[in-house]
Amino acid sequence: MLTDKVASLDVERIRADFPILASTLHAADDRPGVPLVYLDNAASTQRPRQVIQSIVDTYEKHYANVHRGIHWLSDQSTDLYEESRNKVRAFVNADDSGEVLFTRGTTESINLVARSWCDANLRAGDEILLTEMEHHSNIVPWQQAAERTGAVVRFLPITDDGRLDLDVLDQFLTERTRVFAVAAISNVLGTINPLETLIARAHAAGALVLVDAAQSVPHQPTDVSALGADFVAFSGHKMLGPSGVGVLYARRDLLDAMPPFLGGGSMIRKVTTSGFEPADLPSKFEAGTPPIVSAIALGAAIDYLQGQGMEAIQQHEHRLCVLAHEVLDSVGGVQRLGPSPGDKCGIVSFKLDRVHAHDVAQILDRQGIAVRAGHHCAMPLHKRLRVAASTRASFYLYNTPHEVEQLGRALEAAKSIFRRKS
Ligand code: PLP
């Protein structure tokens, strides 16, 4: 809930922490560069010095393999790695750190559940419920699980303005539904889905719920215990952390009953020539050498986000979203995708009349503005909206109202270029 009591972010001070934001692009002999306006945060965010420094410090002072060596350096790096897990636990309010698994990212976290839980529990005719607004990472692993088990994948429809159609939820959540996998926030529409309602209704129908939180954990406070979700997946690189590390939160009783996802070192208690015994949580699901340095740096990213305050970040992005809607509406010829700002976060996708999304992105890029264009790994959603491709601007704590206004001016310029051409 947004309130006026939340302190505003000091965005200029925040920007000074991000070296890349001082970049200028496209400089040539005869012209100076243009400043970078980074509006592609839903794809991946930038990193503050504090996170970069954590990576340098780990390599320079603390690095060794974790949970392996009986030497001082290995103990140090193990302590930092486990300390970071505990920061993640506190950040999302999980009960215990055995419920926090480090993975390579949201995609791997979802694959872990779709492979381990589904293969052990699904039978032919069971149903997996997804929604029409999911990212491919929250579609394909379930389609693969369905191929292996004979389960059926169904898609909860959305309304024309980009919300889940709750009126038909009961037709889709049936006694055959075993798992419901849903994005907390759509990576295209920015829609914030009513998770409490969805989880309560899914549990009442006897289904487990996986929340794809790739676009929510970085941008708003998260409390997995209060939410009651069974599985929650997110990525480090979308929350100021490094790429190559992500998280799966899962209820302990579920993880205890699930078979390991990958086999190898670290995930075993004992191996003999006739078999193996898996290790306790969380090691059971962390086979091989984990992303040690990235996981430690994710802890530094969490420190940074908490230092700013997740409510303040959410509030800041909401203001930018409201402004972006005003700016896009004033350009004219812009079709916005998704609901009004009250029900969405700082992700604004749109189509510019008669101009392909890739052309829009290229023209914006010439002015230093980085946005994403295409289907944003959500082809079924674009098909449902009857839009081949869209352009997406997505904001984070370091973006400014001035940058949103620059986006508007650059779109005006794009419009006039294409008007001259046609
Ligand atoms: N789910 C959503 C909603 C996303 O936006 C993304 C990335 O854009 C993913 C899943 C996949 O995340 P990753 O590529 O970090 O695994």
Image (spheres, helix red, strand yellow):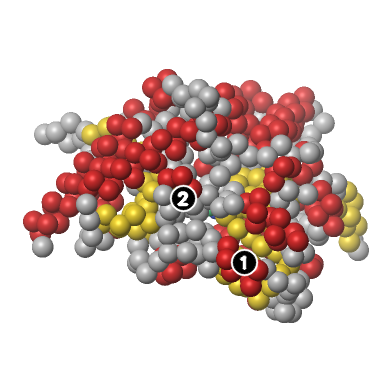
Residue type for callout 2 = Gly
Count residues near mark 2 (Cα–Cα under 10 Å), then give few for <14, some for 14-19, many for 20+. many
Q: Position of residue 46 (x, y in %)?
A: 45, 36
**Pick the front one: 60 or 281:** 281
Q: Is residue 253 above or below residue 18?
A: below
How far across and how far down the image is residue 119, in percent?
75, 68
Q: Position of residue 137 (x, y in %)?
A: 56, 59
- Residue 352, picture quadrant: bottom left
- Which mark, residue 190? 2
Q: Residue at x 75, y 59 (%)?
A: 203
Say whether disc 2 or disc 1 marks the residue closer to the N-terminus. Answer: 1
Label 1 lies in ligand 1 vicinity (Cβ under 8 Å)? no
Q: Circle 1 sits on which residue?
A: 169
Above or below, 193 relative to 11: below
- The x and y percentages for residue 261 are 74, 58
In the image, residue 319 sits, relative to residue 4, either above or below, namely below
> Which amino acid type corresponds to the residue marked 1 in the rendered image?
Leu
- Secondary structure at numbered mark 1: helix
The residue lying at 38 percent from left, 33 percent from top is: 399
Q: Residue at x 70, y 60 (%)?
A: 201
In the rendered image of this protein, does residue 174 appear above or below residue 310?
below
Residue 34 seen by the camera: yes
Does residue 188 appear left or right of residue 281 in this picture?
left
